[in-house]
Image: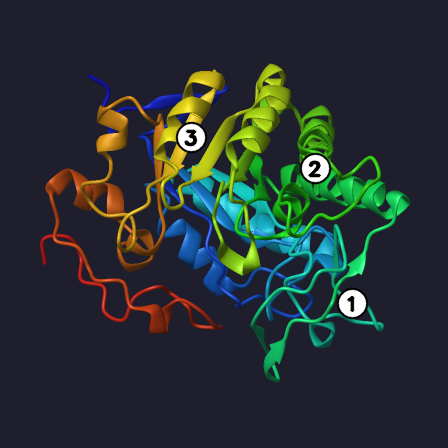
Amino acid sequence: MTTVFDPIDLSGTQLANRIAMAPMTRSRAGEGGTATDLTVEYYAQRASAGLIITEGIQPSVVGQGYPFTPGLHSAEQVASWRRVTEAVHAAGGRIFAQIMHAGRIGHPVLLPDGLTPVSASPVSAPGQVHTHVGPKDFVEPRELTGDEVRQTVADFVSAARNAVDAGFDGVELHGANGYLIHQFLAPNTNLRTDEWGGSDEARIRFAVEVVRAVAAEIGAARTGLRISPGNPYNGIDEPAPDAVYTALVREIEPLGLAYLHIMEAVDIRELTLALRKQFSGTLVVNVLTDGPTGPDDHSVIDDGIADIISYGALFLANPDLPARLKAGGPFNTPDPSTFFGGDAKGYVDYPALGA
């Protein structure tokens, strides 16, 4: 029986185990959206993961949705991430960059030169976003024109190329959690009637075009996609997600991607199983539980539901998580107060295993 501790060949990238570190926003980038010394330490410290997937990295200036998040659209940013990938590789790890365009999730105070957040349609998100000047109500985003949609696809491609140049083993395209790709997929945020909206087939087009273009640029074996069907985060409403995500996976299946990463939402396991049958490549699952994905949730590997399991908060609190899972603990308790900001290491006190 395959276990979470067995190695796996990820489309030519050899992973030491089937434990992935999930992508998580840290809001601690340096000047100009660069990775810092702490970024290097943070990811190298977790290099025993079979695969690290970074925090969301914006592909363009207007793609930023939170304060102090990093980019991959300037030479300085590429150089700063090269230090991270070199440190992870030196420690024996593998690392993919998550490319995330926040879309309508953001605020003009986070953007330069009078820019405003953009989206599939001019539909505001509910609630507020935290900024460097305090919480701000989400604003109505500007609807992308057809030409701007194509330019945004090109921005994803450029960022993916920059990621490879920075030494990343591949990229994960963030199509989940209510950000731009998800905003094109969801019926309440995509009200378009042109080629990019108006039907299930049209609403998946942006996601499909981004995936195809990135795979053509850096290779499908270095390209992954994250989705979260039915996830209401950031004001998304997908009351009947099955048809859209079945159609999406049908379109990307022939490409031979490195993986499909499903972040499960309420009552979505049946769809996960259906997509598992539909997608012939490596399936990564972030398991839905009452809290953070827990030590026993790797049963999805034992049961053949997933090929890789991704851990979020538990990996923040336990940088050597694979060893702790193998030993059966002990596990440090995730403390949200350590998750964000310039000193966001993910834990308060980190005793060594067995101490």
Q: Secondary structure at mark 2?
A: helix
Which quarter of the figure is the C terminus placed in? bottom left
The residue lying furthest to the right in this view is 147
Cα separation, mark 1 vs mark 3, equals 35 Å
Q: Amino acid at mark 3?
A: Leu
Q: Amino acid at mark 1?
A: Thr
Quarter holding residue 32: bottom right
The residue lying furthest to the front in this view is 239
Who comes first in sequence, dot 1 or dot 3? Answer: 1
Residue at 38% in and 35% down: 285
Whether residue 42 appears in this view of the structure is yes
- In this picture, residue 355 sits left or right of residue 67: left
Could you classify mark 3 by the number of other residues whose Cα lies within 10 Å: few (under 14), some (14-19), or many (20 or more)? some
Disc sitting over residue 139 in the figure: none
Q: Secondary structure at mark 1?
A: loop
Cα separation, mark 3 vs mark 2, equals 19 Å
Whether residue 92 appears in this view of the structure is no
Q: Secondary structure at mark 3?
A: helix
Disc sitting over residue 271 in the figure: 3
Residue receiving disc 1: 116
Disc sitting over residue 203 in the figure: 2
Quarter holding residue 88: top left
Q: Amino acid at mark 2?
A: Arg
- Circle nearer the viewer, 1 or 3: 3
Residue 326 position, x and y percent, is 16, 38
- In this picture, residue 239 sits left or right of residue 146: left
